[in-house]
Amino acid sequence: MSEPAPNDEFIRLYVAKAEAERAEADLLDPASAAAGSFGPGGAAILLLKGEPHRQPAASGSPLSPPEAEAAARALAALGLPADDVAAVCTRAAGEEHGSGSAVRRLALAVEACDPAWLIALDRTAGADAASVLGVDVLAVGTPLARAGRVWLVVDGLGASLDDPARKRRVWAQLKTLADS
């Protein structure tokens, strides 16, 4: 058996480091950690969910199975790497916007994952992402390129699943990533 190529070893170490940093982020605030995160460290895309859904998936994902499926289909349709996705809740259920530990946890999760694209799936996650970036607000549906990453807030992926008009609006917002 041949030894791994130096690049393979680097990638393995990078992913292990990212996963350890995400675990450290979860320890910053036990209530926030209960919100959950899912996916590989070092993922190309980080999905941000404002609060966990009411019935967590068996996988531990902060997204409900229909949300995860809709996100994967949308990313694949846009030609983005739908199989290289991580997801994190930006706050625990009932946690207030701007909670210092939640902002630190999200900032550390973003740095640990080091994604090329961050997609806030609802306005709550968008407000939390703005806090991490140090800006007042991220405009819904308008990608922002900052520090080698593209940030986008959509108007409620989960809520759009039962609302055809909102689904069209969210899809139009997601399509802006194709141009960024």
Image (cartoon, rainbow, N blue to C red):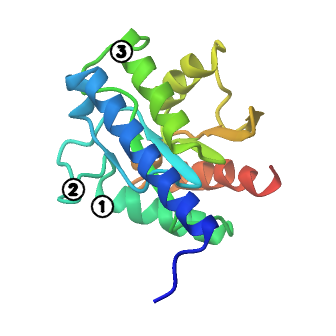
The spot of residue 23 in percent (x, y) is 32, 38
Q: Amino acid at mark 3?
A: Ser
Which corner quadrant of the image does residue 102 belong to?
Answer: top left
- Of label 2 and label 3, which has the lower sequence position? 2
The residue that disc 2 covers is: 57
The spot of residue 154 in percent (x, y) is 57, 41
- Distance of mark 2 from mark 1, alpha carbons? 7 Å
- Residue at 44% of width from left, 18% of height from top? 103
Q: Residues within 10 Å of mark 1 (few under 14, many from 20)?
A: some
What numbered label is drawn on residue 82? none
Q: Residues within 10 Å of mark 3 (few under 14, many from 20)?
A: some
The residue that disc 1 covers is: 65
Q: Amino acid at mark 2?
A: Ala
The spot of residue 10 in percent (x, y) is 57, 58
Q: Are marks 2 and 1 in contact (CB under 8 Å)?
A: yes
Task: Say whether residue 132 is visible.
Answer: yes
Residue 27's place in the image compared with 96, above or below, is below
Q: Amino acid at mark 1?
A: Pro
Q: Residues within 10 Å of mark 2 (few under 14, many from 20)?
A: few
Q: Count how many numbered circles sit on residues in the image.
A: 3
Q: Nearer the viewer, residue 157 or 15?
A: 15
- Of label 1 and label 3, which has the lower sequence position? 1
Question: What is the secondary structure assignment of the residue under circle 3?
Answer: helix
The spot of residue 98 in percent (x, y) is 44, 11
